Amino acid sequence: MYFIFLVFHILLDSIGVRSDFTHLNSDQRPLCPCGSNSSSIHSRVVGGHDAGKGQYPYASCLIDSSWRTARPAPFCGATLITDSHVITAAHCVKDRPPEVVLVDIGDYDFMDNRKLRLRKAKDIIRFPEYRPYSFRADIAIIEFERPVQWASGVRAAWLPPPDLRLEAGTIVSVYGWGRLQYDGGHPRFLQSTELPVVENHICQHQFKTHIEPSMICAGGQEGHDACIGDSGSGLVVRLDNEFVLCGLVSFGRRCALPRVPGVYTRISSFIEWIYKNTLHSKCQPCIYNTQIVPMSNNNSVDMKTSITSE
């Protein structure tokens, strides 16, 4: 345990986050209602399927209010983490002021009763070390004006413990309202698909850029991937009977190319920063209490013989 904490401490120092969590135990706020309304995982985003209703009650998306169209498509995804905050990718909001950002919270059917879920962004907090060209620390928090009403069925997502490890081969799921294919349209219903975690050096070889420990590499199965409009959407891993938010869609190459994984921001590297920037909420974020996710041998992808230089 000491070794894990030491490694995590070094990692956080390298991206500017401190790892002092002693004040978490003294927080007097209640925990936000967290987790799925449904424990079912549907194994039927690109190559995905309609998610189960209530499966991801924290799934949210971002809409640009300056787009003068009758039905504006979401430009990015987000995930509810408190009654007043969603988390997304920093590149989604790097050039957008809060006044043009609308947050569609806890959605499933993008065309149904949208006005009841919409919130105006109040503040956008990007991680200080975010670098747009390398996607380093590609994470941001959006605070919105009116807190959500938990009675409406929405929930906050479980956040991972800071020492969560995802072994290569672990099956994770990504959700969002991004395009169904690279040149396709957006779906009406929330989509989800399963992906295997792969080692970071695979993505480093593919993208010819440094893949930091604060990133997750996942995917590589032809026809299964996040796509345009999914940036900032959540990557979750199933622990016991709960989904735990482990990543955010960050960058990739086109959509669902064979043996080309996508890169995700690793949430566990930013837990302290998330906590400190959500202190204004009425309830505190939920941090799941577990450490290691065992490797799954099912649906794993052999990437070793398929990487080609560009």
Image (tube, grey):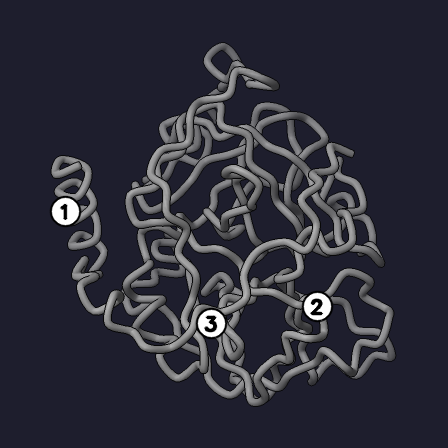
The numbered mark, 1 or 2, whose residue comes first in the sequence reads 1
- Residue 2 left/right relative to 172: left
* Residue 306 screen position, x and y as percent: 53, 15
Q: Mark 1 points at which residue?
A: 10
Q: Name the residue under label 2.
A: 153
Circle nearer the viewer, 2 or 3: 2
Q: As shown in the figure, which amino acid type bears the numbered disc 3?
A: Lys
Placement of the N terminus among the 4 image quadrants: top left
Q: Which element carries disc 1, helix, strand or loop?
A: helix
Q: Are marks 1 and 2 in contact (CB under 8 Å)?
A: no
Residues 10 and 21: in front is 21
- Residue depicted at x 67% and y 44%: 39
* Residue 4 screen position, x and y as percent: 19, 38
Circle nearer the viewer, 1 or 3: 1
* Residue 86 screen position, x and y as percent: 52, 70
Circle nearer the viewer, 1 or 2: 2
Residues 16 and 159: in front is 159
Q: Are marks 2 and 3 in contact (CB under 8 Å)?
A: no
Q: Which element carries disc 2, helix, strand or loop?
A: loop
Q: Name the residue under label 3.
A: 94
- Residue 281 left/right relative to 79: left
Q: How crowded is mark 3: few (under 14 residues within 10 Å), some or many (20 or more)?
A: some
Q: Which element carries disc 3, helix, strand or loop?
A: loop
Residues 80 and 154: in front is 154
Q: As shown in the figure, which amino acid type bears the numbered disc 1?
A: Ile
Q: In this view, does 139 lie above or below 100?
A: above
- Residue depicted at x 52% and y 14%: 302
Give the Cα distance between marks 1 and 2. Answer: 39 Å
- Residue depicted at x 77% and y 48%: 52
The numbered mark, 1 or 3, whose residue comes first in the sequence reads 1
